Image: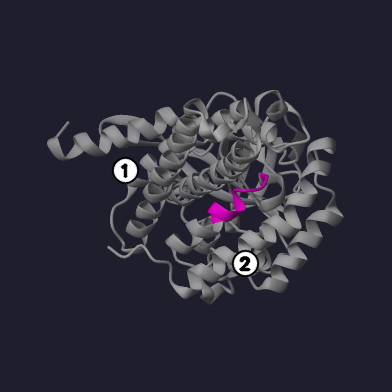
Amino acid sequence: MNFDLTPEQAMVVKTVRGFVENELYPLEPEVERTGRVPKEMAREIQRKVKALGFYAPNIPEEFGGGGLDSVTMALLERELGRTSWALHVWWGRPSNILCAGNDAQRERYLLPSVRGEKIDALAISEPDAGSDIRGMRTSARRDGGDWIINGTKHFISHADSADFVILFASTGEERIASQAKKRITCFLIDKGTPGFEVRPGYESVSVRGYNNCILSFDDCRVPASQILGEEGLGFEMANTWLRSTRLSVAATCVGKARRALDLALNHAARRRQFGSPIGKFQGVAFQLADMVTEIDAADYLTLAAAWRVDQGLHADREIAQAKLYASEMAARVTDRALQIFGGMGLMSELPLERMWRDVRVDRIWDGTSEIQRHIIAREMLRPLGA
């Protein structure tokens, strides 16, 4: 197997890393201090990314995006992972699920998102239905040519900055394997639609400035033309979309961990105790060895899963493995890096304490570690008829 990067991939890695280090690192302290990304800051990031020609790299070229393959996208996301979600979300990666829209929907939602004129937010999670998508209570009932939506969503990332949401709601029931299951349908809902309210969410120790919101739908009426895809096929669409987001989480975890390792390694080489650099002592040296080994393992798992996607191969197990291992690896690596710094690692003068807090959410969103283990085991057992 050839693990060398192509010239294009090497250029992507170099360009994105340079942008992150030179343009985004300096903005981190303000975002951590205030818990927000000012609109002017966000728009300036967008402007600079567009000038690089890297905006919407995940969207096919036929729709005006960068059309990067999954492996190259994983490399790009890995470099973005070095900084906070609150900042790199403005790099602009519209939801791929928008490509499933019809011509009118693409013109109204996808193309403006590719141009950076609109921002979407995905609305799935509910107070009583997180991992269990079919357990959602938000419902939509048909009323003539319209649909009436009622319910509540929460933990909806950056909905405060979004122009519209991609909403998943129950539209009845269907029987699957002799069991009654809710039919899930996807809707495109513009902010400002009567009956649709966006409220501030909860204060979180992770990803400050990347706000979560609560969405309320109270007899929110939308025409049938706002259905994305087909009625009742939202569950399948959600599963397809979540595959790419789990790869994104895995890749960003690798980026976070590599930055933490870089900080710890440099500190271990410079910091002297008992007349020697602390990296000379086995207690530190062995931790560094374990850190780089785990990071490399997560990196290769992620790239291998992305490669399978590019080859059109079934990759559910591999994606779940990458997301599971990378997210849990990042927690271990950032914790070890902080330990190597000692008390200074907990101080806000260094980015480590933020990274230590931020990686905690990676084991939860886009499918918890437990859900990933369920997927992995299911994929192993299915061929055996279990």
Q: Which mark is residue 373?
A: none
92 to 66, vertically: above or below? above
Chain-order first, disc 2 or disc 1: 2
98 left or right, relative to 27: left
Q: Secondary structure at mark 2?
A: helix
Q: Disc 2 marks which amino acid?
A: Thr
Snapshot colouring: one colour
21 left or right, relative to 364: right
Is residue 55 among what the camera can see?
yes
**The one of 263 and 130 positioned closer to us in this rendering:** 263
321 left or right, relative to 37: left
- The residue positioned 13% from the left and 36% from the top of the image is 384
Q: Disc 1 marks which amino acid?
A: Arg
**The one of 71 and 350 positioned closer to us in this rendering:** 350
- The residue positioned 48% from the left and 56% from the top of the image is 74
In this figure, which residue is indicated by the disc labeled 1? 317
Residue 78 among those drawn in magenta = yes
- The residue positioned 53% from the left and 43% from the top of the image is 253
Q: Secondary structure at mark 1?
A: helix
In this figure, which residue is indicated by the disc labeled 2? 15
Span shown in magenta = 77-84
- Mark 2 neighbour density, 10 Å: few (under 14) some (14–19) many (20 or more): some
- The residue positioned 72% from the left and 73% from the top of the image is 51
Q: What percent of the width, then of the height, locates residue 355?
A: 64, 36
Residue 254 among those drawn in magenta = no
Q: What percent of the width, then of the height, locates residue 207?
A: 68, 37
29 to 155, vertically: above or below? below
Question: On the image, which quarter does residue 339 sit in?
Answer: top right
